Image (spheres, helix red, strand yellow):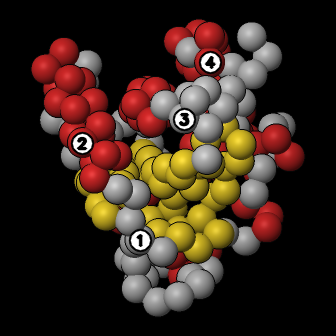
Amino acid sequence: MEKAVLGGGCFWCLEAAFAPLRGVASVVSGYCGGQGANPSYKQVCGGDTGHVEVVSVAFDPAVIDYATLLQVFFAVHDPTTLNRQGHDVGSQYASVIFCQNDAQRAVAVEIMRQLEQDGVFDAPIVTRLEGSATFYPAEDYHQNYYAQNQQQNYCQLVISPKLSKIRQKFAHLLQNS
């Protein structure tokens, strides 16, 4: 298994996006990249710790490669808005890739270069590439959030449309296909 650590707005959205993919063994919501150990959701949301909401994705590279994970990542969030995803605003919602090694960094640079060259987005990509950093799992109630709260307004209005996009664009990657 390999690990990808990605931040693209609310971790609930990313967790729901990656969980159904073939080759993904687990997705854990958490925090990365700030100061201080074991931050709480309240501390991170306050913006004082510098941590970003992220997901840690354990995946089998023989089934799904890192480049494919990044393609899904860039499809389900807006990498052109600095510290913002929709109504979620603050540094904790940054678009960031915590590269676990030089190979991941090279793949991320190439994917972002290709997206820019192809003009996929109307504005420049502001996704940060960071080195590996300590990952802190979020509180239990954040784990598997969408699956447990699908009827909640945020899930219906924000996460469900992203999952529809995945089903349309990446149907071939889904576990049930």
Task: Name the residue beneath numbered marker 3.
Answer: 61
Residue that numbered label 4 is attached to: 173
Q: Nearer the viewer, residue 78 or 140?
A: 140
Q: Which residue is mark 1?
A: 133
Q: Is residue 104 left or right of residue 62?
A: left
Residue 129 vs residue 20: left or right? left
Q: In the picture, residue 25 is in which quadrant?
A: top right
Distance in Å between CA atoms under marks 2 and 4 = 23 Å
Local secondary structure at mark 4 = helix
> Marks 1 and 2, how far apart in space?
17 Å
Q: What residue sits 54% from the left and 35% below the top?
A: 61
Q: Earlier in the sequence, mark 4 or mark 3?
A: 3
User: Measuring 34% from the left and 46% from the top, which residue is drawn there?
Assistant: 104
Pair 1/2: label in front: 2
* Comparing labels 2 and 4, the label whose residue is closer to the camera: 2
Which quadrant is home to the C terminus? top right
What amino acid type should be assigned to the residue bearing mark 1?
Ala
Q: Earlier in the sequence, mark 1 or mark 3?
A: 3
At 48% across and 74% down in the image, what residue appears?
Answer: 134
Q: Residue at x 86, y 46 (%)?
A: 148
Disc 2 from disc 3: Cα separation: 16 Å
Nearer-N-terminus badge (2/3): 3
* The disc label shown at residue 106, or none: 2
Q: Earlier in the sequence, mark 4 or mark 1?
A: 1
Q: Amino acid at mark 3?
A: Pro
